[in-house]
């Protein structure tokens, strides 16, 4: 699979940067790994968020969409798993 380009939305970038450095780096590296390889612990979402993906990155989940026509990964939210019951 050719790599995807990552386009972070401003809110998602701010959310990740508000975390401690090691957690933020784990999230950035996890998204980068998926963008390059298409692999990882990534689930697809259903219902209102159908079409979005959710990788597990430690205690965090990052919601993102794939734009296949331009090969782009767009992370738009991160959340702590315990807070959201995931």
Image (cartoon, rainbow, N blue to C red):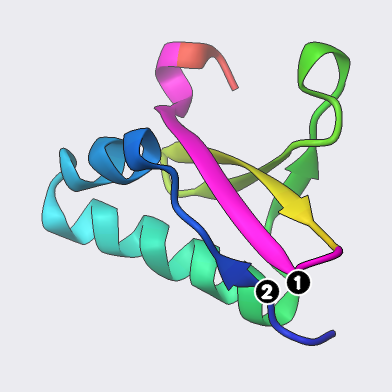
Q: Residue at x 64, y 81 (%)?
A: 36
Q: Residues within 10 Å of mark 1 (few under 14, many from 20)?
A: some
Q: Is residue 68 above or below residue 2?
A: above
Q: Residue at x 49, y 64 (%)?
A: 30
Q: Residue at x 75, y 70 (%)?
A: 71
Residue beneath label 2, please? Answer: 4
How far apart in space, not on screen, are marks 1 and 2 (Cα)? 9 Å
On the image, the x and y values in percent for residue 45 come to 80, 29
Residue beneath label 1, please? Answer: 38
On the image, the x and y values in percent for residue 44 come to 82, 39
Q: Nearer the viewer, mark 1 or mark 2?
A: 2
Q: Residue at x 75, y 72 (%)?
A: 38
Q: Is residue 64 left or right of residue 58?
A: right
Q: Are marks 1 and 2 in contact (CB under 8 Å)?
A: yes
Q: From the viewer's side, name the closer residue of 3 and 34.
A: 3
On the image, the x and y values in percent for residue 59 come to 41, 38
Q: Is residue 43 above or below residue 25?
A: above
Q: Is residue 25 left or right of residue 9?
A: left
Find numbered disc 2 in the image and state the secondary structure of the residue it sits on: loop
What's drawn in magenta, residue-wise?
69-83
Q: Residues within 10 Å of mark 2 (few under 14, many from 20)?
A: many
- Mark 1 or mark 2: which comes first in sequence? 2
On the image, the x and y values in percent for residue 39 come to 74, 70
């Amino acid at each position: 699979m050719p790599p995807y380009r990552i386009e972070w939305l401003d809110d998602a970038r701010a959310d990740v940067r508000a975390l401690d450095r090691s957690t933020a780096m784990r999230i950035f590296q996890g998204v980068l790994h998926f963008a390059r390889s298409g692999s990882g612990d990534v689930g697809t979402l259903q219902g209102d968020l159908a079409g979005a993906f959710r990788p597990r990155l430690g205690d965090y989940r990052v919601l993102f969409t794939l734009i296949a026509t331009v090969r782009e990964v767009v992370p738009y939210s991160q959340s702590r798993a315990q807070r959201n019951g995931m």
